[in-house]
Amino acid sequence: MGAGGIGGYYAARLLHAGHEVVLTARGAHLAALEEQGLTVQYGDEVWSFPVQSMDHSAVVARFRPDDFDVVLVTLKSTATEAMLAELGPWLYHGKVPVLSLQNGVDNEPALASLLGEHRVLGGLAVRIGGHIVQPGVVQAEGPAQIVMGEWPMALGSDLRGQLLQQLQEDFEAAGIPTTVSDNIRYELWRKLVINNGVNPLSALTGLDTRSLTHHPEFRKIVHGMMAETVAASKADDVNLGPEDLAEMFDLISNFNAIKTSMLVDKEKGRPLELDSIAGAVLRRCERLGIEAPYTRTVSALLTHSQS
């Protein structure tokens, strides 16, 4: 669900490994996928595949939910609510598990409220940059790992563990480095630390991640927004600590110079994932009664620049 930069890359890997994959998209991107197939640029490699692609209404018309082994959601978090409105009743009448590979910490709760926790797998795409560069063509970079697990944490009492083991084997065989976590909420929050640290500020300044983390002043803001995210995690009983902050700041500081998805969205005039990233932090800080001045200021400036 959502064959953009991230979804398109993972779909290509699975298609190359011989799996049957159905992709959803819309607009010019969908038209190009239907007419020309999917092209993925990854480093010096270019892959092209004919694909089954359609919009959500066509999925509902052509398939039953349990025709699929798993539904992977790689939509922007801004589209989660609309996706559930369009596909929720269809999904509700099946048993197929749903794996979210989206930014933020609020997608899995939304899925679980509709489908029940027993059908929800939490996940995140790690160290990957991916964008649609033109309709039908996506560009991706980085090791492109997946971390996934039973949401909100592994209990060992249902079938999700078996499915995760099978998915891990299949993903690895397709060239996707994959880890299964017993505490996926912890992993989702660690990624939110990075996302809140660099995404809003990059969209505000126009700078990539390396430029931000190596700038004498902006790196302090990145660190401050990351620290506020670590503090906010306590509202979800995740309780990240100083060691998580240090590790995440070191990771993004030493990773490739990535143009963040929020900066790309701003340049293309698309809705920003600001509420699911900075908003998630601010709501939880308010609940805890603590201040988040870096996140609040950058979020307010970015919101103003959009108006």
Image: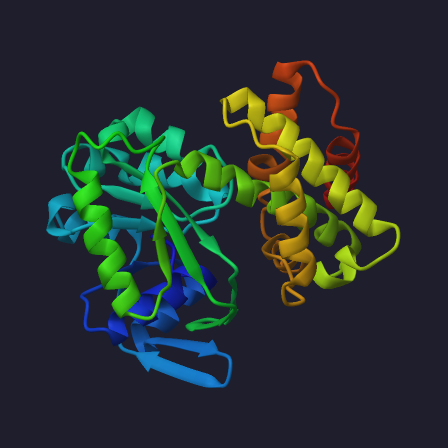
Residue 166 is left or right of residue 239, and the answer is left
**Front one among 33 and 251:** 251
Q: Is residue 118 above or below residue 126?
A: above
Q: Is residue 127 above or below residue 275?
A: below
Residue 266 can be seen, yes or no: no
Q: Is residue 307 above or below residue 236?
A: below
- What is the quadrant of residue 205 in the picture? bottom right
- Residue 80: image location, x then y, percent: 42, 40
Number of labels in the image equals 0
Location of the C terminus (image quadrant): top right
**Front one among 192 and 136:** 192
Residue 104 is left or right of residue 73, and the answer is right
Most distant residue in the right direction? 216
- Residue 11: image location, x then y, percent: 32, 65
Most distant residue in the front direction? 243
**Front one among 120 and 24:** 120
- Residue 138: image location, x then y, percent: 46, 71
Q: Is residue 292 above or below residue 136?
A: above
Residue 137 is left or right of residue 208, and the answer is left
**Which residue is at 18% across, 65% downward?**
20
Residue 192 is left or right of residue 171, and the answer is right
- Residue 246: image location, x then y, percent: 67, 45
**Which residue is at 57% across, 43% downward?**
273
- What is the quadrant of residue 174 in the picture? bottom left
The image's colouring method is rainbow
**Which residue is at 17% across, 32% downward?**
158
**Which residue is at 67% across, 53% downward?**
250
- What is the quadrant of residue 151 in the picture? top left
